[in-house]
Image: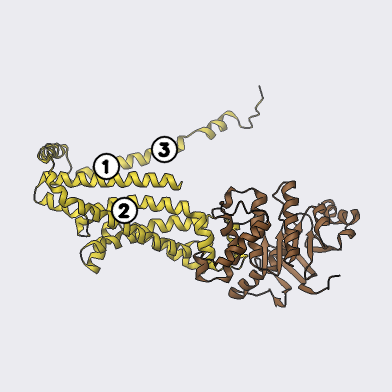
Amino acid sequence: MKKVNNPLNEKEFKALISKRKDNLFYLIILIFMTFFLFFSLSQMNINPARVIRGFSTLSDLIKNMFPPDFGQLSRLWPLAIESIQIAILGTVLGIIFSITLSMFAAKNLTPIPGLGVILKGFFAFTRAVPALVWALLFITAVGLGTLPGILALGVNSIGMLGKVFSESFENINKATIEGLNSTGASRMQVFFQGVVPETIPIILSWSLFRFDINIRYSSILGVVGAGGIGWELVRASRMRDYPALLMVILVILVMVYAVEQFTGYARRVVR
Amino acid sequence: MKQKDVLIKISDLKKSFPGGTEALKGVSFDVYRGELLVIVGASGAGKSTLLRCINGLSAISSGSIVVDGIEVNGLKGKKLRQLRTDVGMIFQSFNIVNRKRVIDNALHGRLAYYGLRGVLGLYSFEDKKKAFEILARLDLEKQVAKRADQLSGGQKQRVAIARAIMQEPKVLLADEPVASLDPGASSKVLGYLHKICQEEDITAIVSLHQIDYARNYADRIIGLTEGVVTFEGGPEDLDDEAIQELYFNEEEEE
């Protein structure tokens, strides 16, 4: 056995490995959170009786939904396609703007150092405002239909894609950029011939992931009137046409699942 | 005999880095048109910094570098890019775009001759033909369509040479071009570099830390020790005594 020379005495050693200080900290947080939970429940008038009543209504609702109204299908699938189109166009719009803006946001590429900070703030802002809020804003600006939906998804995508793209540009090997700079290539040339090719797997896999997210958003954007299948959800529930409502939900389910399978496959291909 | 026509004139070049490190402490020498000049010295002697100052990758602190009549100090934007097309560079770690094909990397040497077309990678047929021809001269004709990350180190460095030659440069700077290669690949790469510079009549400045390579390929050798020129002469002048001075003096000081 190797002899271990412990320079601490027993008391110091125990103090060193003791977690009591941390435990006290977590206990205070736990007490606070428990208090807040019960405060919220009482303040919002949520009691068990109400939840139980809700369950029975919900089971009635589900019983009324069956069988789903397959007659709706011929009307619903073009709307599902429209939702997919909104998601595709919104994602493409987001990708184009994200790549272009990231060229100016990445610390190692930006021509004006301060611009990066401003753009990253802009990304954070577009990310923080939810897609549905963007849709409402664009409906006010350009009117109802698919266009506000596309714009909303595009702008909301910039927040996420701009952040990850500019960060991946910042992590690129400095030597690659220097090599192209040494040939006398311009900033734009270095970017599109060097930086983009080196980060294309990251760009593609995040774009596909964002498309996944956008397809979910586009299926409910219609709720506020921004095109696609979402409006059918509102219509069926207002008319208490539960079999139709179930059909809409099923179509959305199939649509989202199919797209998810496709993007999952595509992401494996691009690595 | 070669006519001694000065292509690069370096006078009292000083370079210090933020933090106070003085990498070059007043370096002066001339580079003649058509020669292969080797710069030797221990690591940290300032070889890389010196080369990077010549094409403006590092800004100099004081002094002057004149390349074919153009003062490098203070060049910016378009003029700096113009200088860089005239001055090709090869790096220790190759610095090519790994996810692009070999031929695309060679064509990158032409980017400065294109505007927006270069951004999109739309090169003329003549340039593509020329890139293939140069790659073939470097024995890479079987690799042209491969992605650069599939190549060995020696092959990557040859691609980097092809890119530099595609620039049609007046001068080629090679910063420790074989430092990350094994001995076999090293002499091969240096052989190609030597041959192609002679054939294209390109002046070359090569920094090396291996003395044997320097002796084999150099027309002239300059020795740097801690940012000062301590040797200047032909390969035959670099005797054991000179080597001793270059490499072992500073170690004693430490």
Nearest to viewer (mark 2 / mark 1): 2
Colour of chain B in the image: brown
Protein chain holding label 3: A
Residue occupying the point 45% across, 57% down: A165
Residue A24 shows which numbered tag? 3
Q: Is residue A119 left or right of residue A195?
A: left
Image quadrant containing the N terminus of chain A: top right
Protein chain holding label 1: A
Give the CA separation, mark 2 to mark 3: 43 Å
Q: Which chain is yellow?
A: A
Residue occupying the point 66% across, 24% down: A2
Residue A180 shows which numbered tag? none
Dot 2 or dot 3: first in sequence order is: 3
Give the CA separation, mark 2 to mark 1: 33 Å
Query: Is residue A188 something one can see in this rendering?
Result: no
B99 and A4: which one is in front? B99
